[in-house]
Amino acid sequence: MEQAASDIVFQSYGRCCNSEQFFVDFYGRFMGTSDEIRALFAETDMKQQRHLLRNGIMQLVLHARGMPDTKLRALGESHSRRGYGIRPQWYSLWLQALLDTIREHDPEFDSRVESSWREAIGPGIEVIRNAY
């Protein structure tokens, strides 16, 4: 039986979460994409931010597994122009940084895992992005 994308992602994320370095590496990579993005985190408690990221990715995964989008809508509101002002075009940079970090940390990463991540969390990212 074909394994669902959300199951592949759930397992992949579990492997990544085995190391706190995953979240450190993600932010190093994401903040390296532009000075503008790096500036967003200038006054940020990164330990707390990594905790929020861990939870936020889990919300995307849970949404892919059938949970309602309530928490993603709240994330969208906090990240919108009325909140942190996270521009819609930055989500593609975020996703690419995430996938590159997963590639580095998930020993089972391959093209199937990557496409599963894109398929599973894409709709949730759109919920957040569309709140802008």
Image (cartoon, helix red, strand yellow):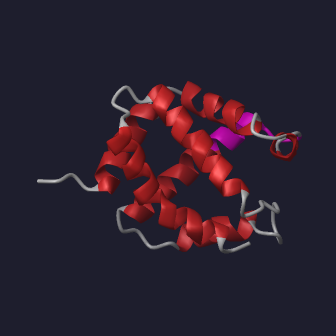
Instruction: Name the spot of residue 112 as percent of width and height, x first.
Output: 33, 44
Name the image quarter holding residue 120: bottom left
Q: Is residue 113 magenta?
A: no
Instruction: Name the spot of residue 92 as percent of width and height, x first.
Output: 64, 53
In the rendered image, the residue lying farthest to the front is: 111
Q: Residue at x 88, y 41 (%)?
A: 43
Magenta segment, prevailing SS (helix, strand or loop): helix
Q: Is residue 50 magenta?
A: yes
Q: Nearer the viewer, residue 55 or 30?
A: 30
Q: Residue at x 83, y 72 (%)?
A: 82
Instruction: Name the spot of residue 78 as percent of width and height, x first.
Output: 73, 65
Instruction: Name the spot of residue 6 as percent of width and height, x first.
Output: 34, 55
Q: Is residue 18 above or below residue 6?
A: above
Q: Is residue 55 above or below residue 81?
A: above
Q: In the picture provided, is 64 more to the left or to the right than 47?
A: left
Give the magenta range: 43-51
Q: Is residue 80 above or below residue 109?
A: below
Q: Residue at x 40, y 68 (%)?
A: 67
Q: Nearer the viewer, residue 70 or 5?
A: 5
Q: In the picture provided, is 106 more to the left or to the right than 97?
A: left
Classify the position of the C terminus by image quarter: bottom right
